Image: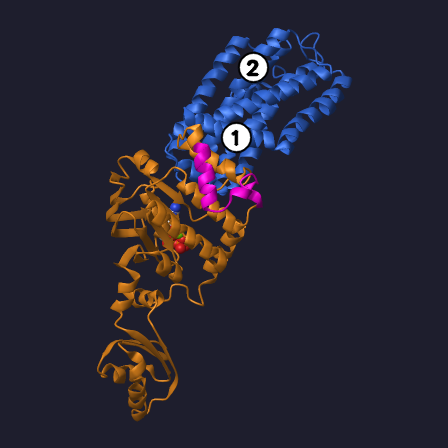
Amino acid sequence: MIEVRDLSKVFNGRIKAVDGIDVEVRSGEIFGLLGPNGAGKTTTIRMLATMTKPTSGQAMVCGIDVAKDPDSVRRCIGIVFQDPALDDQLTGGENLDFHARMYGMPRKEREERINEVLRLVELSDRADELVEKYSGGMKRRLEIARGLMHRPKVLFLDEPTLGLDAQTRRIIWDHIMKLNSAYNITVILTTHYMEEADFLCKRVAIIDHGKILAIDTPENMKRSLGGDLITLKVKDAAKTASIVRSIKGVKQVKRHDNSVSIAMANAGSRIPELLKKAESAGIEVESIDLHKPTLEDVFIHFTGKRIRDQEANAGDRLRERMRARNRR
Amino acid sequence: MNAIYVIWLREMKKYVRNRSRLVGNLAMPFFFLTFLGMGFNSMGITGLPEGISYLDFLAPGIVAMSLLFSSMFAGVSILWDRQFGFLKEIMVAPVSRTSIVIGRIFAGMTSGVIQAFLILAICMLLGVRIANPLGAVASIIFIVLIAMSFVGLGISLASKIEDMHGFQLIMNFLVMPTFLLSGALFPLDKLPAWLAGITYFDPLTYGVDGLRGLIIGTSHLPVVLDFCILGCFCAAMILLARHLFNKTEV
Ligand SMILES: Nc1ncnc2c1ncn2[C@@H]1O[C@H](COP(=O)(O)OP(=O)(O)OP(=O)(O)O)[C@@H](O)[C@H]1O
Ligand SMILES: [Mg+2]
């Protein structure tokens, strides 16, 4: 459905927002672009949706080259932008009506379709209210409904749940799953929520600094780390790491400031052995944590950082709050 | 074709719905006519064409003024769509940029015509003497040209500036001089030569003059000449708007 070859976008001749990515998305798939702020997710989507021209490389969407025939690509895709893109001086129904007319849908089909998508996102009873009066989640659902109006084959969702609360997020996830299975729409979504990528996506690409670091199913990615993850909190991380490395069955060892994370199969039954070794080497273990690997761990593995650090820089957090507010 | 209508329809829905803008657009001309018009009227201004009161003289100028302001605003309001993200929704649709521009120009023109005739009605209520009813009806030609010109200019500017600060600059440094130098408030032929020279570069001068010729039956230049110059300016603005808007990205 989508084929991307060596696609790049350079802004102002120096900012490499997207740096030679190759991706293939199959028909009917939910595909995720997972990456931190500024990774190049939105820029990638914008190129695929013909909103901005690639600096180099090629992108085929629905079998059409985005640079050669943008109009045909536009007919084939639907998109929900990262930032709100509704006219809040119009009602929900009018926003959908505008969209349908822009896509040249005849009157009868238009009316039927508006009712259909409104039902799908459970907004039928609010259709005649000004969008101004909608909550953030309702606006997002309306935008998703709008993206579906003209029956696109491919739907782009740029951070569909950014700034929404957990409950609303779940509702939107359900809608996305429903459309994918009921209408076989190919969905490409970007997110920096790990759970979202894990829950929704058949395959995920991890993107950072404009480059794709890995593409696979979430399961395979987690498995590739080599079993369960043990985190030991210790004073002397360097010494611990070197001792742990010599233990049989340990797949990977990562040293942090005052902890060591270890990937190994059946980690639970190996903890006593691990502790014994540590004790005999004179290492004091302060605490121990054992868990199945998550996408977060995968992400740390590939990028060397957490996607949303607790100490996320203030600018980013401010930006998110602003966005969340705009949604309201 | 269809897209032009859809864009137009959206603008009209919002225009009709936005009562305060509608009233606001009529309030300023009304104040100008009553307070400024009546004020100077009673002073007995000299230098006006024979048999024309200041209020008569002012009326076409105020029609032009309201068209200038509301049309510029209609064009520049693309900035609001950009700000609120709706421009992305418009731009990702499979329609040509040109039809988006034309739709907006037509919408600005429609509301301009409605507004201009409402103001003309107010003028008549205030006792402005219309020279010839047919002429007043024919003034729609100038009303349309003024509206389309400045919506076009507004779109062009909005395609070039990114934010709201630019909007303030435009209003202060472009719209106000255009209005004041157009001869809407005073006759241009008594101005010092250097200033009179500048007024000939103000496109609204020809709009005001044309309206005056048709509505109160006296003009500085031949109305046909006004028409030709304003027509050329209008065409240029539409082409410019199309060109610049085609190049914008959202
Ligand atoms: N129009 C632009 N002009 C200049 N630089 C840009 C522009 N758009 C994006 N960038 C830069 O390109 C990089 C990638 O931005 P992009 O919006 O694609 O990131 P993202 O992955 O969507 O991030 P986020 O999670 O914050 O939405 C950033 O460094 C950004 O500053
Ligand atoms: Mg983004």
Q: Residues within 10 Å of mark 2 (few under 14, many from 20)?
A: some
Image quadrant in which you'd find residue B62: top right
Residue B125 location in percent, x, y? 72, 16
- Most foreground residue, A52 or A34: A34
For mark 2, name the chain. B
Which chain is mark 1 on? B
Front-lying residue, A251 or B43: A251
Q: Magenta span has A97? A: no
Q: Nearer the viewer, mark 1 or mark 2?
A: 1
Is A122 inside the magenta-drawn segment?
Answer: yes
| Apparent side of residue A66 relative to residue A178 in the rendered image (left or right) | left
Residue B203 image point, x, y percent: 52, 21
Answer whether residue A30 is visible to the viewer in this image.
Answer: yes
Write down the residue under mark 2. B140
Of the chain colours in the picture, the one used for chain B is blue
Magenta stretch, residue numbers: A110-133
Chain A display color: orange
A202 is higher (above) or lower (below) than B36:
below
In primary-sequence order, the first of circles 1 and 2 is 1
Tell me the kind of residue under disc 2. Ile
Q: Residue at x 31, y 84 (%)?
A: A271
Q: How many marks?
A: 2
Q: What residue would you read off at disc 1?
A: B11
